[in-house]
Amino acid sequence: MTPVQDTRKILTHPHPLLRSACVPADVGRNGTAVQAASVLAALLAMDHPLKLVNGLAANQIGLDKRIVVLKRFPNRYHIMVNPEVVSSRLTIPSIEVCASLPGIVRMKLRKYWMRVRYHEPEGEIQHLSLFGSAAFTLQQELDHLDGRLIID
């Protein structure tokens, strides 16, 4: 998918959309692909080797859909529509920062390993196993989709 140019700013606390649960996205619809591309574009615009930006949820740019973009490796991103945790194991502390809460650092208890099911924007179902920082990041983004922040 080619990212679209996105001029959206990252919403910051206390914007009300950050506290609202997102609604499921319409899988396979062009509008969902455009929204997913917008989330990717916003993440790419923030991406920098000196920043710890490894994921972004749609509501952080003003979209109330269950869409997450997760950075896995340099220049490799997973676009997840309606992601859901299938299983998870081993709870450990994670030190976290958030683009919507600049300057705030929190320690949260997160699952170290998880398996997630999601749709690609075009509709294909995918499964992905994550561990360590990738699992921590996805859990934080899933919290965003449910209206929760690292300060909760």
Image (cartoon, rainbow, N blue to C red):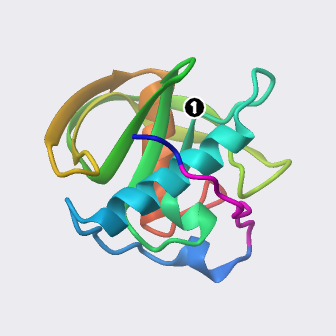
Q: Position of residue 122 (x, y in %)?
A: 22, 50
The answer, for residue 35, to whether it is visible in the render is yes
Q: Residue at x 14, y 44 (%)?
A: 124
- Report the residue at 47% width, 51% height from top: 37
Magenta stretch, main secondary structure, is: loop
The x and y percentages for residue 44 are 64, 39
Q: Report the number of numbered marks.
A: 1
Query: Mark 1 packing: few (<14 Cα in 10 Å), some, or many (20+)?
Result: some
Q: Residue furthest left?
A: 125
Residue 68, above or below 65: above
Point out the image quarter for the C terminus: bottom right
Is residue 85 located in the magenta-colored stretch of the structure?
no
Judging depth in this view, the residue of 15 and 43 nearest the camera is 43
Q: Is residue 138 left or right of residue 19?
A: left
* Element at label 1: strand
Which residue is labeled 1 in the image?
A: 94
| Residue range corresponding to the magenta coloring | 4-13
Give me the residue at 71% from left, 58% from top. 100
Q: Position of residue 50 (x, y in %)?
A: 81, 23
Tell me residue 21's x, y (percent).
42, 74
Instruction: Give the camera-side residue of 101 and 74.
Output: 74
Q: Is residue 73 above or below residue 99?
A: above
Please tell me which residue lies in front, 3 or 110.
Answer: 3
Q: Disc 1 residue type? A: Ser
- Residue 106 seen anywhere in this rendered image of the structure: no
Please, is residue 121 above or below residue 19 in the view?
above
Q: Is 7 colored magenta in this rendering? A: yes
The residue positioned farthest toward the bottom in the image shown: 16
